[in-house]
Amino acid sequence: HPLWGQYPEALLFVNWLYNHSSVLHERAEIIKCAEMLMQEDDFEICESILRQQEKLRERIDETLSEKIVQKCRNMNGEYVWPWILPFSAAGMKHTGIQYQ
């Protein structure tokens, strides 16, 4: 059984996290460096870009997760995880997902 079968909320979480604007911003900065590297032929500039890319990767830690993984209140006043919010706000019940 895949993880999603045992923990259906896990797929919602992964999708929410991958598409969160703050996470997208982090990824975009790293991808921008990769794009710059493809267009650059000066060795020293490439080294500088690689150093910047490494700094960006080193900044990735639990700080952002602690900031964004917080329960929020839905339209009914209940506190739910943000990856559950679209289902709870619409009054939909997602079968198999347990609210914590």
Image: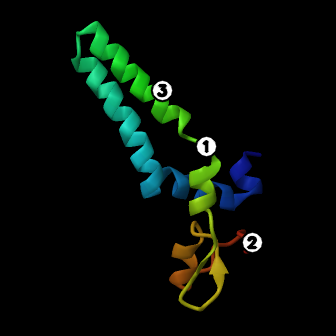
Residue situated in front as seen by the camera: 11 or 96: 11
Q: How many C-alpha atoms fall within 10 Å of the one at disc 3: few (<14), some, or many (≥20)?
A: few
Q: How many C-alpha atoms fall within 10 Å of the one at disc 1: few (<14), some, or many (≥20)?
A: few
Quadrant that contains the C terminus: bottom right
Q: Nearer the viewer, mark 2 or mark 1?
A: 1
Local SS, label 2? loop
Cα separation between marks 3 and 1:
13 Å
Q: How is the image coloured?
A: rainbow
Q: Residue at x 35, y 26 (%)?
A: 34
| Residue 72, horizontal then vertical, whole percent | 59, 77
Residue situated in front as seen by the camera: 56 or 39: 56
Write down the residue under mark 1: 61
Residue 79 versus residue 65 in the image, above or below = below
Q: Are marks 2 and 1 in contact (CB under 8 Å)?
A: no
Cα separation between marks 3 and 2:
39 Å
Quadrant of the image occupied by residue 88: bottom right
Write down the residue under mark 3: 54
Q: Earlier in the sequence, mark 3 or mark 2?
A: 3
Indicate left or right for 5 with 66 as reference: right
Local SS, label 3? helix
Write down the residue under mark 2: 98
Q: Amino acid at mark 2?
A: Gln
Local SS, label 1? loop
Q: Amino acid at mark 1?
A: Asp
Residue 28 versus residue 75 in the image, above or below = above
Cα separation between marks 2 and 1:
28 Å
Q: Amino acid at mark 3?
A: Glu
Q: Residue at x 53, y 89 (%)?
A: 75
Residue 37 versus residue 15 in the image, above or below = above
Residue farthest to the bottom, as pictured:
76
Indicate left or right for 2 with 20 as reference: right
Q: Residue at x 44, y 44 (%)?
A: 26
